[in-house]
Image: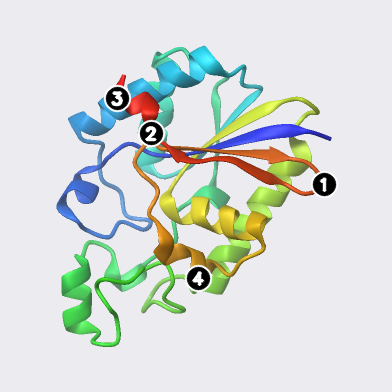
Amino acid sequence: MTGTVLLVRHGETTWNRDGRIQGWADSSLTDRGREQARALGSHLAAEYDLDRLVASDLQRTRETAALLDEAGVGPDPAFERAWRERDFGDWQGLTRAAIAERHPEYDPDGSLLAVASVPGGESLDAFEERVLDGWDRLVGEVADGGTVAVVTHGGPIRAVLAAVSGRDLAAVAPEFSPANCGLTAIRCETEPAVLRRDVTNHLSL
């Protein structure tokens, strides 16, 4: 079986703009985020024949998926909890600097995703297991020659990339943070291969 999975991060939100940690908390897309989603939608509609569209069930991914639909992307999205961002518990709504003040063990210049446990939230292991269960189900359902797009978050994208490359998520997480409406493409074969990682050329159109 050979198919393609496109992983895309949602558009910019008010909390992204303000540097606040979102996790499972909801914040709306900014005007810039809506423009990003429309540009991504136009790119997907022009360049790919999608068999399926899957999205996290959080507000920001639902908004992004709706804007992709307006731009001509089909079919209708299926919303799945597996593709949510990590639950950052007590840290949600805080900036990295505020977290470091309350928890001196946290390095504000490091990756929050790489932290093993979060007060009141989801452990790194539990998060990774949830996302990779969703990934395995998705790959098992990709039709031969088909293309599926997933509207998700920065954490799940890095979790999948770590699994596909056979690396530890805690090591991959600090290397980069996926851009809002960046596009990652993975070819699904016996040995999956990353075709593109966090491409953003379509956002400058």
Q: Is residue 62 left or right of residue 106?
A: right
Name which of mark 4 and mark 1 comes first in the sequence: 4
Name which of mark 2 and mark 1 comes first in the sequence: 1
Residue at 19% x, 29% y: name it.
Answer: 31
Can you identify the residue that label 2 sits on? 200
Q: Are marks 2 and 4 in contact (CB under 8 Å)?
A: no
The disc labelled 4 sits on which kind of residue?
Answer: Ala
Q: Are marks 4 and 1 in contact (CB under 8 Å)?
A: no
Q: Is residue 68 above or below residue 148?
A: above
Residue at 62% x, 64% y: name it.
Answer: 129
* CA–CA distance in space, label 2 to label 3: 8 Å
Count of residue discs:
4
Can you identify the residue that label 1 sits on? 190
Can you identify the residue that label 4 sits on? 171
Q: Quadrant of the C terminus?
A: top left
The quarter of the picture where residue 141 lies is top right
Q: Quadrant of the N terminus?
A: top right
The disc labelled 3 sits on which kind of residue?
Answer: Ser
* CA–CA distance in space, label 4 to label 1: 24 Å
| Residues packed near mark 4 inside 10 Å, few (<14), some (14 to 19) or many (20 plus) | few
Q: Position of residue 21 (x, y in %)?
A: 27, 60
Q: Label 3, secondary structure: give it.
A: helix
The quarter of the picture where residue 64 lies is top left
Q: Are marks 2 and 3 in contact (CB under 8 Å)?
A: yes
Q: Nearer the viewer, residue 190 or 95?
A: 190
Q: Position of residue 18 (x, y in %)?
A: 15, 52
Name which of mark 1 and mark 3 comes first in the sequence: 1
The disc labelled 2 sits on which kind of residue?
Answer: Thr
Can you identify the residue that label 3 sits on? 204
Q: Nearer the viewer, residue 144 or 54?
A: 144
